[in-house]
Image (spheres, helix red, strand yellow):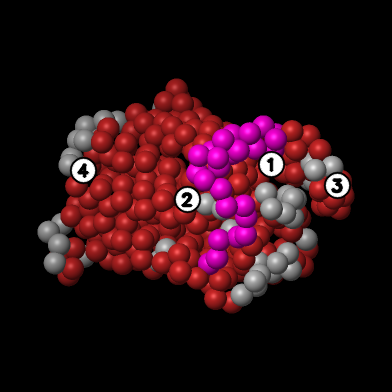
Amino acid sequence: MKDSRKEIISWAFYDWANSAFATTVMAAFFPIFFSQFWSMGGDSATSTFFLGLGNSIESLIVAVCAPVLGAIADRGSYRKKLLIFFAFLGAVMTAALCWVKAGMWPVAMAFYIVANIGFSAGNTFYDSLLPSVASEKKVDFVSSLGYGLGYIGGGLLFLINVLMYLFPSVFGLQDEIQAVRVSFLMVGIWWIVFLLPLLFFVKEPDGERITIKKAVKDGFGAVSKTLRSLKQLKNTAIFLVAYWCYIDGVDTIIRMATDYGTALGFSSSSLIVALLITQFVAFPSALLYNIFGHKVGIKKALLIAIIGYIVIACFGFFMTSEIHFYILAVCIGLFQGGIQALSRSYFSRLIPEGESSQFYGFFNMLGKFAAIIGPLLLGIVTLITGEQRYGILSLILLFVLGGVLLSRVDETNAKQEIAAFNCNK
């Protein structure tokens, strides 16, 4: 039954579970450790390039697989099973980073890529469960609740990991290096433990019970069908391209901000404090932005967030001191949860019922294709110019394109297109 409090909370707690990877690993310790420990002896521009390349490889793999996996999940009711598989894959590979030694950057990057695949592919099936957990009336709130819990949960473990990093002896650790390694292990355990509520209390949506072999066969066929469907669902297609553009900039800022701060010479402790600021600002902001979205309209709220990110990119270009980095962290926190949560819930209004996994597969595919371009663009521009600032500034184009396309989406026309699409099935 939709809007069950137990199911909603259990679903939202997966954000709490996997956000520890996004904070402790993706945004904080992996970029710092990669440049200062695993890539010892290399220059910062080269390190930035390989970090961007690694993120792009992972994104390409997930982008290619996401629509097929989503279609398979729809045909065979395997959403929860595939979510659990990828969550375990991500958690195990994250924990494995604990044992990667200094200078072994190819191994570290390989583990990180596979962990990212688990994180990103798992989110495809997590997102696809949203329409079955929440009604259209509550979908914006439930999506925002997930991101809100993600920020507070990820921020809580990150705070513990930061204290371990700053005061290793208090936790019985030898030094900062061991603190970071243990943090990777803790993220893996945290991820699995807080997956359990979803595992036990969220029901698999009703669907045809078929074998995995048939689901795979039907899944590949459904991909081409979905592409054909987008010709009829023009507003859905426009939104997907708009999302592709603006989420590129958002994801690139999330993944590369710490590396950017390191290149500017900011201390590791200041970078970590800034990330903590982002987490704890983003928690209430994600929930408040949902309220703001219902006041002004979801699409308008998304457009305002896009403008906010254009300002953030400009500010990042001129940033010179650590206090600027703290201000930037607050600004990112204000908009990050809102643009992610409302994008996810807004998309649920633009897709036919019963095909959420394959459409969310395309949703996540475009997000991943965007994440191929963004980090790689930033890395290449940095490598060519020797200045990370120009890479950050280049992201403005993506936000502008995304905003222009989003302004052309008409939700009323989208519902009419969905009704016509359902009649023609």
Q: Which residue position is annotated with label 3?
A: 423
Give me the residue at 52% from left, 52% from top.
78
User: Residue 197 or 397: which is nearer the viewer?
Assistant: 197
Q: Is residue 342 left or right of residue 168?
A: right
Q: Which residue position is annotated with label 2?
A: 82
Give me the residue at 55% from left, 65% from top.
203
Tell me which numbered mark, 3 or 4, is placed earlier along the sequence: 4
Give me the residue at 67% from left, 32% from top.
224
Frontmost of labels 3 and 1 is 3
Mark 3–mark 2 Cα distance, whole angstroms, equals 31 Å
**Residue 138, image x and y in percent?**
69, 69
- Say what amino acid the circle numbered 1 marks: Leu
- Say what amino acid the circle numbered 3 marks: Cys
Tell me which numbered mark, 3 or 1, is placed earlier along the sequence: 1
- Which mark, residue 100? 4
Mark 4–mark 1 Cα distance, whole angstroms, equals 38 Å
